[in-house]
């Protein structure tokens, strides 16, 4: 199984800040990397697919980058509604695996 | 409106069985791969299984292989997860999710709200 390591596990930031969450894959997954946002009691929401493609309807202040083993999710100009847990997930091979999540508090 | 609605969750004893359903609407169901993903209380996301559009190709997480069966009825636009030999560690919210498999990239772009499975005596 491909292990996905996210960091940090939690962070606190302020409205207007820029934050970066990193995700490292245990092997080369090319750009088969997706990012999700999940709020308490809600289903996950797709933000980024194929490492850097923005899902329709997701604000452009959210971006993804990376390839191979190292990936980042960046949220520029944080808004209160960005408070959530963020997960990376590899879709290079099954079993698809998720990172443990990064809890972002604003 | 594109929508996925799970049902069938509940309380079941260890060793018991349960069948989850996921009713799809608003899109051409048989054109999409579908997944089940679960989340234990207070924990992260765990991918469980996937099935292709015609139902002939399935894959499972090792933790459920041989106990869970994913299937679909394209005439009814419904995805299923038959869960047998349930264990306490299967307790979780179970989500179904759609996968457009766009340009060879697999990603879950639409999710249901989830159904809760509790395995306890």
Image: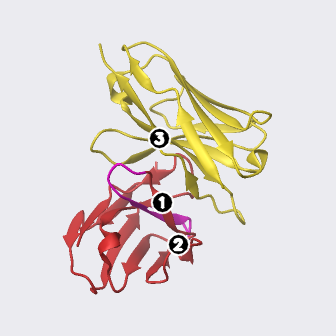
Chain colours: A red, B yellow
CB atoms of marks 2 and 3 within 8 Å = no
Q: Is residue A10 visible?
A: yes
Task: Please tell me whether residue B70 is drawn above or below residue B96 in the rendered image.
Answer: above
Distance CA(mark 2)–CA(mark 3): 26 Å
Q: Indicate which label's residue lies in the foreground, 1 or 2.
A: 1
Horizontal and vertical percent position of residue A55 = 57, 71
Assign the magenta stretch its main secondary structure.
loop
| Residue B90 sits above or below residue A46 on the image | above
Q: Is residue A96 magenta?
A: no
Q: Residue at image x 66%, y 43%?
A: B24
Q: Is residue A67 left or right of residue A42?
A: right
Segment colored magenta? A27-42
The mark that comes first in sequence, 1 or 2, is: 1
Tag 2's secondary structure? loop
Q: Residues within 10 Å of mark 2 (few under 14, many from 20)?
A: many
Residue occupied by mark 3: B114
Distance from disc 1 to disc 2, alpha carbons, whole Å, reads 15 Å
Quadrant location of the C terminus of chain B? top left
Q: Residue at x 21, y 77 (%)?
A: A13
Residue at the spot of label 1 = A45
Element type at mark 1: strand
The residue at which mark 2 appears reads as A51
Q: Position of residue A99 (x, y in %)?
A: 37, 57
Circle 1 chain: A
State the image quarter where residue A106 is shown: bottom left
Residue A24 placement: quadrant: bottom left
Q: Secondary structure at mark 3?
A: loop
Please report, as a chain letter, where disc 2 is located.
A
**Up-down relation of residue A41 to residue B121 (above or below):** below
Residue at far front of view: B1
Give the letter of the chain under mark 3. B
Choose between A71 and A18: the one closer to the eye: A18
């Amino acid at each position: 199984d491909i292990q996905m390591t996210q960091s940090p596990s939690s962070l606190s930031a302020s409205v207007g800040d820029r934050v970066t969450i990193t995700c490292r894959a245990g092997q080369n997954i090319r750009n088969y990397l997706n990012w999700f946002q999940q709020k308490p009691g809600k289903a996950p929401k797709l933000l980024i697919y194929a490492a850097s493609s923005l899902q329709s309807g997701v604000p452009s202040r959210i971006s993804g980058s990376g390839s191979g083993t190292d990936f980042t999710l960046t949220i520029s100009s944080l808004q209160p509604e960005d408070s959530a847990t963020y997960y990376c997930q590899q879709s290079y091979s099954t079993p698809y695996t998720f990172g443990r999540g990064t809890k972002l508090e604003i | 409106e594109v929508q996925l609605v799970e049902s069938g969750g509940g309380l079941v004893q260890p060793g018991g069985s349960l069948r989850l359903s996921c009713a799809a609407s608003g899109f051409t169901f048989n054109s999409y791969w579908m997944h089940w993903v679960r989340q234990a209380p207070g924990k992260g996301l765990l991918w469980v299984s996937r099935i292709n559009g015609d139902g002939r190709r399935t894959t499972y997480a090792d933790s459920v292989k041989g106990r869970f069966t994913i299937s679909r009825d394209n005439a009814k636009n419904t995805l299923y997860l038959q869960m047998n030999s349930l264990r306490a560690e299967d307790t979780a919210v179970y989500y179904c999710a759609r996968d457009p498999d766009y340009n060879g990239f697999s990603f879950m772009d639409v999710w249901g709200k989830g159904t809760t499975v509790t395995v306890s005596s």
